[in-house]
Amino acid sequence: MKGSILAINSGSSSVKFASFDVASGIQPQRILHGEVDGIGSAPRLLAWEHEGAALEERLLDVKPDTSGATGPASDHEAALDAILAWLDQHPSQGQPLAAAHRVVHGGEQFTEPTVVTPEVLTQLGRLDRLAPLHQPHNLAAIRAIAALQPGLPQIACFDTAFHAGQAWVMRAYALPQRLSRAGVKRYGFHGLSYEYIASILPAHLGPVADGKVVVAHLGNGASLCALLERRSVATSMGFTALDGLMMGTRCGHLDPGVVLYLMAEHGMTVSEVETMLYQQSGLLGVSGISSDMRTLEASPLPDARAAIDLYVCCITRELGALAATLGGIDALVFTGGIGEHSATIRQRVCREAEWLGVELDETANLRGQLRISSATSRASAWAIPTNEEWMLVKHAEALLGTRAIA
C-alpha cells in the first residue's frame, strides 16, 4: 500500500485534490488528481491518473445534514467524505497519511506551514473578511476532514507566507501607526505559486535565476511578484486579495475614495460594495460578458476588447513599478492559467515590456515553449507552469518529518 499526502485546494464550488506518493522516492510523486465540482448544486466526483487516464466520474448523492441545513460546511463535508471514501475503496492509489491545505491568508501570525489545531483554526477564521472568496472555503475543507477523520494530521500552507520577509517599506501603508501595529499592512498572495516557480528557476534560467526576476501569476486571480535571489521583495497585492491587477471578477487597484463615494452618494452598504468589488468587477464587470479570458479572446464584441486592453494595461503598469523596485529586470516569467495558456496576453505584455529589454520570439510564444524570448533578448521571457500542489506536499513532508509519513 502506498503512503500518500493529500493536497487540497478548496474553493466555493469545488474541492480539488491530488495524492502524492511520499514513501518511494526522494521527491513526492503525484499518483492521481481530481476534484468534486458543482458544490451547492449538482456535485460530481472526478478523478484521473497522473498521466491523465480517467479513474472516476459520477454524480454525488448529497443530502442535507441532520438539521436540514446546507451550506459551506455541510457541502464541503459531503465533498470531502466522497473523496476520502473513494480513496479508501482504491487503496492501490494511496492511503492518505496527512492532508495539506492551501490557505490564502495567514495574517501576521502564520508565516510558515502550520499543523492545524482547533486553536489555529479559530485564529484563521478571524481572517475570513480579508479573503472572503477563499478563506471560508479553505477552512471548510479543514473542518470537514477534522470531522470525518479526526486522527488525520492536517497542515495549512499560506499564500501570504512567501512575502513575509519583505522590507518594512514594501509592506507598510501610510496610515496611523496604531493600524499598522494592528496588522493593517500589505501581505501579498499567490505565495505558493511564486515559491514553486522560485524553486525551479535555476533549472531553466541558470545563474540568472538569482537575479532580478518578475513573475506574473495570471489567472482568475492575478498578481505580480518581484524576486531577487529568488525571494519576494515586492508584490502587487496588498492587505487583501482584492488589490493590484485587474482580475476575473475583482477590480484590483482602486482609489479608496471610490468606495467612500459609492457609500455616501449611491447609498451602497458595505456588503453591496464588497460583492461588487469581489464578484462583479474585473474582466466580468468591464466586458459585461464573462470573467473567462478564453471567452473574451474569442469574442468580437468591443467590450470584450476593452476588458482585455485594460487587463494588459494594468499588468504593464505594475510591471513597470516592480522593475523600478528591482532596478531593471533580467527575466519575466508567466504562470497561472492565463499566463501559461494565453499566447495573446503574453505577446501583448512582452511588447509593452520591450523598453525593459524583452524581445519576444513570436514562434516560440505561439508554440507554448518554455522560453518565449529571442536568443538575443537582453531580458529573457518564459512561460512556466506552476505547481502549488507540489509545494503543499513538500511543506507537509518537511513539517511532519519522514518518520511521521513513512
Image (cartoon, rainbow, N blue to C red):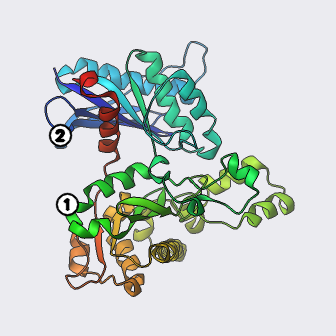
The mark lying in front, picked from 1 and 2, is 1
Q: Secondary structure at mark 1?
A: helix
Question: Residue 141 or 103: which is nearer the viewer?
Answer: 103
Residue at the location (38% across, 76% down)? 329
Where, by quadrant of the figure, is residue 252 drawn?
bottom right
Work out whether 110 lies above or below 173.
above
- For badge 2, the amino acid type reads Ala
Is 269 situated left or right of 255 in this image? right
Residue at the location (39% across, 79% down)? 348
Quadrant (top left, top right, bottom left, bottom right) of the C terminus: top left
Residue 391 visible somewhere in the drawing: yes
Q: Name the disc covering residue 203, or none.
A: 1
Work out whether 154 lies above or below 233.
above
Residue 102 horizontal/vertical position (percent): 43, 40
Return the residue found at the far left. Answer: 24
Can you identify the residue that label 2 sits on? 53
Quadrant (top left, top right, bottom left, bottom right) of the N terminus: top left
- For badge 1, the amino acid type reads Ala
Is 125 situated left or right of 19 in this image? right
Q: Secondary structure at mark 2?
A: loop
Work out whether 354 lies above or below 281.
below
Marks 1 and 2 sit apart, C-alpha to C-alpha, by 29 Å
Residue at the location (33% across, 82% down)? 358
- Few, some or many C-alpha atoms within 10 Å of disc 1 (few <14, some 14-19, many ≥20)? few
Residue 128 horizontal/vertical position (percent): 61, 39
Residue 288 horizontal/vertical position (percent): 58, 64
